[in-house]
Structure formats: structure tokens, C-alpha cells
Image (cartoon, helix red, strand yellow):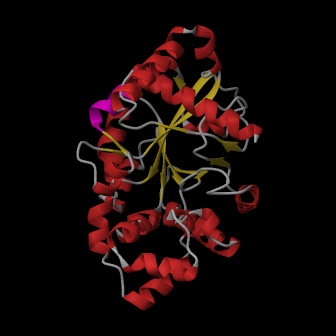
Amino acid sequence: MRFLKSGLKKAVGGAVRRLPALRRSMTQGLNVFLFHDVTDEPSPFNAQYALAVSRATFRRQAAWIRDNFEVIHPARLFDQSVLPPRAALITFDDGFLGTFENGLEILRDMQLPSVVFVNMRAVLEQTPILSVVACYLNQHVPEFAGFADSVGLRRPYHLTLTPKLLAEFEQRSGALDRAAVLDYQGQFADLQTMRKWSDARWVLYGSHLFDHWNVRALDSVEFQHHYQSNERALAQFDNRANLFAFPNGQPVSCFSDSDVEQLRQLGAGRVFSARGGVNRDSTQYLLSRCGLGEQDADEDGIWFRMGRAAAEDAFNRRR
């Protein structure tokens, strides 16, 4: 089965690569690429959810982006100049240590700019992000399933767990073993690491909420609190950018039009989802991103990933 899937992926990706018209349809506009951790030793969480790429794979992916697009500095989203017809933007989510020690190092060597969307609570307190907590509870804390059933909490828990329900569970069962959750999650950057890169003008820091709550699990007051708390924490950095990326990032399950409007009212300059697909209009407020992982390790794999993202985006927009 894996062999057939790999063969299909290579065949489709190769077809996209060899057909200029199809290739142009997926490159004309602004393509935003999404990464998480860059490391040769992924944490259990990042390995399980395919959120890490090795240094060698990331170097190949970054070189492919450089060779097929004009990589723009994220600050260009705010100026009045017209972006190049094959523009690309490189982004990272969350704030894993490997993003800084490996990903940004590689991009610096290649002279490519990027933006890192950070959950500052994890940086300031070295505490696990909430999506990891929810996944850990599901897999390693047997009594959580019974609690979830009793309060009507639906799977996947990282999309539905609310602040009040997490607090209620800890009141009933005791405080979570956060050291064990951190081992499962993997290491985040600390303030010293972020300050080291804050003078690199080709790297900007954007917001990913103060903690990695799924926005649909928050009420509007909680959403505002996490947004503004992260903005205050990011204000200490000179390279802070007025850019926001939704945690998890898929429309419907992760955010709604009203959430986008609330961000506009709160002053967010541009907002990013993880929907996938090329942004034909680079001036639009909500921009789509295409995630790349270790499985997208060669040119055919990346073209396949882009083609699948474009097809899924087109299908979802017609629904």
C-alpha cells in the first residue's frame, strides 16, 4: 500500500513538474509555505503528527522554493509595491527550538527571509502548548476519556478542549505532569534564543496566540485575551510584525469569518490560515498556506503536495 501511494505521488508530482501550463497555474500569485520544527531528532509529538523535517530535507525544500519562486521579505505585505508574479513566503509556526537553531540557520546561509509565528507563553514559561496537552491527555491519561465523555467533549480534543474544561479536569484529577508533556512535545525556543535572532532583519516574529488554543474552542473574550497577551509579549522584539496565523489553521474547524473580523478589529495587519493553495490576490486580508513535511522530500513530492493543496482548496471553496 505504501509503495502504491509513493508511486502515485511520484507520478502525479512528475506530471505537474513536466506540464508548464499546470505548473504555472500553481505558481502565479503568492505561495506561502508552512513549516514547524526543523530537526534530525523529532520529538514523539512531532514525529507522530509529521510536524518535523530533517535539516537535509529542509535545505532541499528551501532550495526548491528559491529556484522556483521569488522569495519575498514578509514586510513587503505591508508596502504598496506589486509583488512579483511568482512570489513566495516562508513561514514557521509555534516556536520550536529547531526552527531557530536549524531552520533559520539554513535560511540565513541561503539568504532567504521568513516569518516565525510564535506562541509566547511556551517561550516565556517553558510550558507545553495546549494542542500538545490535549493530544497527551488523549493518549497517556486514561481517565481523561471518561471525563471528556461526561462533559460532551468531542475528539479530536486539540480542536475542542476549552480553558474551562481543562481547568475542571485538573481540579478533579490533579495537575498535569507538565514535565512529561514537555518530553512528549519537544523543546521550544527561550527568550535568549529569540533575542539572538531579533536583530536579523530578514526574520520577523508574528503572533500565533499566547497559547496554542484552537480559536473555535475560545469565546470572543478569551480569544481577545490570548491575542492581546501575545502582542504584549512580542512587543519587546524590534522585528515583531503585525501578522497573525491561526493555530491549527483550517477554516470551519479552526476559525470562522467572525474570528477573522475580530482580528481585523483588534488591529491584525494580515492573517494566515493553513488551507493550502496559491493566493491569486496577494492583497487579500486572509492568506492561505501550504504545509511541507518530511514526506515532501524531493521535487516530485513537493509538486504533488502543492497540487493536492490546490485541489482541496478549490473543492472547499465550491462547497
Residue at x 72% of width, y 55% of height: 260
Against 66, residue 45 (above or below) is below
Residue 55: say if magenta: yes
The rendered magenta stretch, by its main secondary structure, is classed as helix
Quarter of the figure with residue 23: top right
Against 157, residue 34 (above or below) is above
**Residue 189 percent coordinates (x, y):** 34, 57
**Residue 114 percent coordinates (x, y):** 48, 38
Quarter of the figure with residue 31: top right
Q: Could you tell me if residue 16 is visible in this image?
A: yes
| Quadrant placement of the N terminus | top left
**Residue 190 percent coordinates (x, y):** 34, 61
Against 43, residue 85 (above or below) is above
User: Which residues lie in the magenta part?
Assistant: 54-61
* Closer to the camera in the image, 173 or 183: 173
**Left or right side of 299 for 31:** right
